[in-house]
Image (spheres, rainbow, N blue to C red):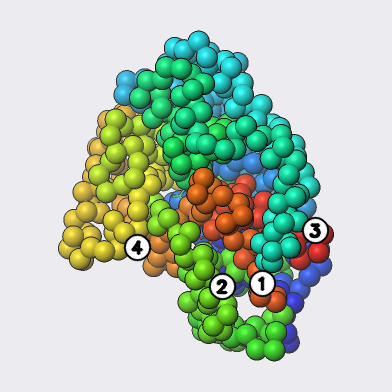
Amino acid sequence: MIREYAIIGGGIGGCSIAALLNAKGHDVVLLEKEPSLGGCASTFLHHGNHYNAGATTISGYHEGGIVRRVFQTVGVTPNVIPSNPAITIIQGDKTCIRYRELERFIGEIETFYPHAKHREFWTLVHTLGIAFYEMQGHYYSNKSALMKIRSLLSLYPIVKRFWRYLFGNARDFITRFYGTLSPQYLDFLDAQILIVAQATSDKVNFFTAALALGYTFNETHYPLGGMGAVCTSLTSKIPDVRTRCPVMSIVKENDIYTLTTPQETIQCKNLIMGTSHYESSQWFSDPTIKKYYQKYEKRNNHQSAFVLYMTLKTLTPYHHHYQLIAETIIPHTLSKSLFVSFSDPSDTLIAPAGFYRITASIHTDTRFWTLLSKTQYQDQKKELQNLLQQWICDKLGVQNEEIVECFAATPKTFGRYINRTQLGGNALTLSNFLPRLPSNDTPIKGLYQIGDTAYAAQGWPGVIMGAFNCMRMIDGKH
Ligand SMILES: Cc1cc2nc3c(=O)[nH]c(=O)nc-3n(C[C@H](O)[C@H](O)[C@H](O)COP(=O)(O)OP(=O)(O)OC[C@H]3O[C@@H](n4cnc5c(N)ncnc54)[C@H](O)[C@@H]3O)c2cc1C
């Protein structure tokens, strides 16, 4: 039997497109290498304890948000609860809470870093977010010169409305806006821009920076049972989801794709790659397809993550998410900030009462890890693990005796499990903006690409925007 659509990779990208196609009545098979779905947003077991592998925060599930839209379209409701506050930021001896309500947050930031321009600045950030998410009808394809021109025309209303924030870097814009700006406040802004946009204010335009700074003005959500459970629920109506099913090779012949897995070979008319763009070419033998993927290799920023996992036994109350900001870049990383997520005390699917699971991540470069000897690698991993553990203890009041378990993952660890060392996807930097990004359709018949290395890039909202865009290409509505 030749399947209509095979989707390789059960990250949020593969899960979303598979669920959307299935909801439209298409024949779909979803193939995931690992025992559970989720990829960067999976939940795994270690010594019987559950941990989120990377992603911990669901943004875009507020009323009208794109993540909510995918669940509504598919007709399932994920088991999530609001996170309030969205993030608690600790920088030096200051603690600043990112309240969702604009007025409350302006009050907070004025105490944190007094400045007369805060109201105007944060109101602009807030307004740009609302205005952008209201805009519909745009799409993106670069499969041919004509499609590129047509999709850029579809984006014209956005360019027309926001042009003054699109050109030039955000740091210059912010510096001009405020007049005077302390380096600490710039670090505060950059830490938040980095976790969403995957780049700091000197590399992105102000529009991207504003969307990154403003995401906490919408409700964010915590996944009960872990991020992986949300991916499982999204795909729950698909009859054919196969885990522990790594695709080892793909042959294209007469417009049919033949996929080899350890269990069987699967043939399909349409293939959707939910794997990273930078890894996908390895499974193909077709030289045209290999060339297509290799064309984008220069977009690989080698950015990745070092992740610390901890179990704590404590009765101390914690918020869902903290961001710790240091004065200097942490050794073996690219960042001054660590994002620390705690399980919710009510989430006994993840941790029994009286225990917390922690996933804490910091940006790094794949090459800081992949070019080392085995001993250097192990020493460096231990050094960074200890440093981050100590930082968490110092800033969040964790006692060493409360730590039941602590271990870490490097870009190499992610490579071993989910076949990718570059994490976080493509950053929408000034040198990597839309016309240069790979789209969800390709010039190759029946081949599509989904996920954070294709349009619209990183994070669940970006990846899901790509899934809707992909559906639009498949439906021919452009
Ligand atoms: C540390 C970290 C923290 C993050 N935090 C957040 C957050 O809080 N909120 C947020 O919205 N985003 C966050 N992100 C970003 C977000 O997690 C990713 O952008 C998104 O999950 C990527 O999804 P994806 O489907 O593109 O790819 P992936 O999640 O990488 O999925 C690809 C899948 O393909 C599978 N696969 C690979 N090779 C094969 C093969 N040969 N056969 C079958 N299957 C294969 C892999 O196992 C994997 O499951 C974070 C990312 C990281 C790394």
Q: CA distance from mark 4 to mark 2?
A: 25 Å
Of the residues tagged 3 and 4, which is closer to the observer?
3
- Give the residue displayed 52% in from the left and 16% down from the top: 118
Q: Quadrant of residue 94?
A: top left
Residue 198 vs residue 316, the one in the foreground: 198
**Which of the two discs, 1 and 2, labels the residue nearer the N terminus?**
2
Q: Quadrant of residue 476?
A: bottom right
- Give the residue displayed 61% in from the left and 21% down from the top: 123
Which residue is the site of mark 1? Answer: 443
Q: Amino acid at mark 4?
A: Lys
Q: Residues within 10 Å of mark 1 (few under 14, many from 20)?
A: some
Of the residues tagged 4 and 2, which is closer to the observer?
2
> Mark on residue 478?
3
Q: CA distance from mark 1 to mark 2?
A: 8 Å
Q: CA distance from mark 1 to mark 3?
A: 16 Å
Name the element at disc 4: helix
Residue contact at pointers 1 and 2, CB within 8 angstroms: yes
**Which of the two discs, 3 and 4, labels the residue nearer the N terminus?**
4
Return the x and y of residue 63 as percentages of the image width and height.
73, 36
Q: CA distance from mark 1 to mark 4?
A: 32 Å
Q: Amino acid at mark 1?
A: Pro
Is the residue at mark 3 in contact range of ligand 1, meaning its CB lies under 8 Å from it?
A: no
- Give the residue displayed 44% in from the left and 12% down from the top: 114
Which residue is the site of mark 2? Answer: 292
Return the x and y of residue 323 as percentages of the image width and height.
41, 33
Q: CA distance from mark 3 to mark 2?
A: 23 Å
